[in-house]
């Protein structure tokens, strides 16, 4: 009994980082609904769901239902393709966010006058 609780606890630890990324994506999309926020939200949400499936659901199904190896392989193949698409969505959203942030920083200095006051300091 104690061994199963420990194994469940250690399998749930792997869900902490995807959960934090999903929460950050939810916060970002609540503040700014743009394409990059939507892609980050979709990518992190699907990744979190797949991580739950890999960590909790799949071991439960394999242990309790005695799934044959061919069926387990089929599930992992399908989930691998879905995970790849989710990763592409997240990476695209992240690159769009970085690109937009870098472009804003390049434009922002030109909007403010240069301070030529040499009397300070």
Image (tube, rainbow, N blue to C red):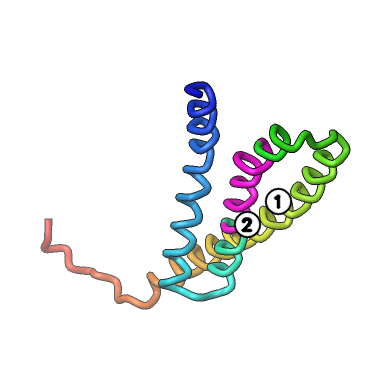
| Element on which disc 1 rests | helix
Q: Which residue in the structure is indicated by mark 1?
A: 83
Q: Nearer the viewer, residue 37 or 2?
A: 2
Estimate how packed mark 2 is, as few (under 14), some (14 to 19) or many (20 or more) residues with alpha carbons within 10 Å.
many
| Element on which disc 2 rests | helix
Q: Nearer the viewer, residue 94 or 27?
A: 27
Q: Residue at x 49, y 52 (%)?
A: 21
Position in image of residue 69 (x %, y %): 84, 34
Q: Nearer the viewer, residue 47 or 107?
A: 47
Estimate how packed mark 1 is, as few (under 14), some (14 to 19) or many (20 or more) residues with alpha carbons within 10 Å.
many
Q: Residue at x 73, y 35 (%)?
A: 62
Q: Earlier in the sequence, mark 2 or mark 1?
A: 2
Q: Nearer the viewer, residue 90 or 22?
A: 22
Q: Main secondary structure of the magenta part?
A: helix
In the image, residue 36 sits, relative to residue 91, either above or below, namely below
Magenta region includes residue 86? no
Position in image of residue 103 (x %, y %): 51, 68
Q: Residue at x 24, y 70 (%)?
A: 115
Give the residues drawn in magenta, as a range. 45-59
Q: CA distance from mark 2 to mark 1?
A: 7 Å
For residue 56, the mark is none
Residue projecting furthest to the right: 70
89 relative to 76 in the view: left or right: left
Position in image of residue 4 (x %, y %): 54, 27
Q: Are marks 2 and 1 in contact (CB under 8 Å)?
A: yes
Position in image of residue 65 (x %, y %): 74, 38
Q: Which residue in the structure is indicated by mark 2?
A: 46
Magenta region includes residue 53? yes
Q: Dividing the image into 4 quarters, which one contains the C terminus?
A: bottom left
In the image, residue 56 sits, relative to residue 114, either above or below, namely above
| Quarter occupied by residue 51 | top right
């Amino acid at each position: 009994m104690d061994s199963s609780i420990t194994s469940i606890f250690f399998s749930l630890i792997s869900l902490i980082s995807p959960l934090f990324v999903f929460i950050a994506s939810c916060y970002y999309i609540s503040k700014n609904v743009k394409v990059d926020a939507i892609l980050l939200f979709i990518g992190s949400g699907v990744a979190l769901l797949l991580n739950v499936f890999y960590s909790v659901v799949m071991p439960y199904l394999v242990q309790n239902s005695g799934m044959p190896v061919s069926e387990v392989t089929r599930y992992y193949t399908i989930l691998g393709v879905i995970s790849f698409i989710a990763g592409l969505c997240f990476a695209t959203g992240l690159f769009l966010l970085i690109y937009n942030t870098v472009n804003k920083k390049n434009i922002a200095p030109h909007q403010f006058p240069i301070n030529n006051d040499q009397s300070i300091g």
